[in-house]
Image (cartoon, rainbow, N blue to C red):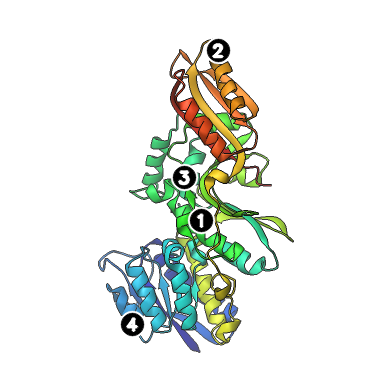
Amino acid sequence: MKKIRLGILGFGTVGGGTVGIINNTIKEIERRLGRHTTIVIEQIALRNLTKKRAVDTSGIKITTNPLDVVNNPDVDIVVELMGGTSLAKECFEIAIANKKHIVTANKALIAEQGNELFAEAAKNNVVIAYEAAIAGGIPVVKAIREGLSANKINWVAGIINGTGNYILSEMKQPNADFGKVLKVAQDLGYAEADPTFDVEGIDAAHKLTILASIAFGIKLQFSKIYTEGISKITAEDITFAQQLGYQIKHLGLASRTKDGFSLRVHPTLVPNSALIANVDGVMNAVMVNGDSVGTTMYYGAGAGAGPTASAVVADIIDIIRGLEQPPQDRVSGLGFALNSLKVEPVIDITEIECHHYLRCFAKDKKGVLATITKMMSDSNISIDNLHQEPCSTNKNDATLVILTNKVKESSINKLLEKLASFKDIDGEIQRIRIDSLE
Ligand code: HSE
């Protein structure tokens, strides 16, 4: 039987999950490969030699130096699961030069350096597969790149960070503010000790960069993504949104507009009627709208050993299935001919038009509401819904929640500046964009 030999870089949660699947499921995988071929794990690079592992590694060469793996002539496919963009990039470059295919879960590296890496891989006739980088176990890369390849994709919208979704979902419980829930998420191992990447939207922006590229056939443009996190969302906002028929979700949104592409990650009020509004906890979901297929949605676990390793092993199987194909017949890394990918215009967030949720605390006295609504009308902003109730923390204030009609972001920004200097408004004004995802 022919052996395809893996070299695994990184032996954390996903590395362990990958070895576990290969150990436990190899007979089924061989049947799927159906070509008298099997997979063996040749070498693993890990950091801690003495750490006890849940999976059997007997017979596997172990090293602490990832460069040993990418230079090992007995390794056919490098499986990069260590993360980071510096050493990982060096490993990619050496692996590619050594004509090894790569499977990775490293969204940061693909989003930030993928344009060069895919070009280098193509020159060397090797594949970089990255299904595990986006939404863990959901095969959304394959769905967009292969399953929907007949479509011109109009938009993609997704909950693509499980930690953020867990936090927003838990904040629906009584007395659960952002800080408390974040601490629970850290204790449960969902959020990193430094949760910035998850809660400030950087992780989602990496994933959205890749989704936009495979959806629209554009170069990876991470630096153009407008990114806003969830750390300023309050439990009160979540309650108000619910009272008005919405859920607050941290979405990655990529759409094709007549003026360019819109690429953004921010908290969003989504109507309860949208399927994605009901995706709670650590789960991920990605909606894709194509011109022929209409709107589709993909749901599943976005992280964790089993789900992420499921995507890693599927990529390994795919690479093996394509080994005897001429390189030009393989699906290209980003799903479009590499030489057709361009840096396309991305429209500035200030040009986006949508409905907005505004919430502020204002003095509960005559004329305040009239002044605020006058400022809105002077800014040509129409009110769709207005709700007022006593402020829970200051008896002299009222809490005002206003939903606007569709308006350009630049107009809302000007209004927010005016409101901020109005002496009868206390504290910061909350602004959350609304999207009906239709
Ligand atoms: N930190 C990510 C999340 C998982 O919370 O979704 C890996 O992409």
Which residue is outermost to the top? 366
Q: Residue drawn at (51%, 56%), measured in percent from left and top?
A: 302
Dot placed on the residue nearer the N-terminal end, 1 or 2: 1
Question: What's the residue type where badge 4 is placed?
Answer: Asn
Question: What's the residue type where badge 3 is placed?
Answer: Glu
Find residue 72 and report its horizontal and vertical position in percent. Answer: 34, 83
Residue nearest the observer in this picture, 402 or 37: 402
Q: Residue drawn at (62%, 25%), measured in percent from left and top?
A: 377
Dot placed on the residue nearer the N-terminal end, 3 or 4: 4
Instruction: Decide: few, some or many residues near mark 4? Use Cα within 10 Å; few <14, some 14-19, many ≥20.
Output: some
Task: Give the residue number, with chain letter if any, for mark 3.
Answer: 228
Find residue 32 and report its horizontal and vertical position in percent. Answer: 59, 77
Dot placed on the residue nearer the N-terminal end, 1 or 3: 3
Q: Which of pointers 4 and 2 indicates the residue nearer the eye?
A: 2
Find residue 29 and report its horizontal and vertical position in percent. Answer: 54, 76
Is disc 1 in contact with disc 2, using a CB cutoff of under 8 Å?
no
Is ligand 1 within 8 Å of the beta carbon of the residue shown at mark 1?
yes
Task: Give the residue number, with chain letter if any, for mark 1.
Answer: 302
Q: How many marks?
A: 4
Q: Which of pointers 1 and 3 indicates the residue nearer the eye?
A: 3
- Element carrying mark 3: loop
Q: CA distance from mark 3 to mark 2?
A: 34 Å
Dot placed on the residue nearer the N-terminal end, 3 or 2: 3
Question: What's the residue type where badge 2 is placed?
Answer: Gly
Q: Which of pointers 1 and 2 indicates the residue nearer the eye?
A: 2
Task: Give the residue number, with chain letter if any, for mark 2.
Answer: 367
- In the picture, measured across the screen, residue 178 lies left or right of residue 298, that is left
- Element carrying mark 4: loop
Dot placed on the residue nearer the N-terminal end, 4 or 2: 4
Quadrant assignment, res 423: top left
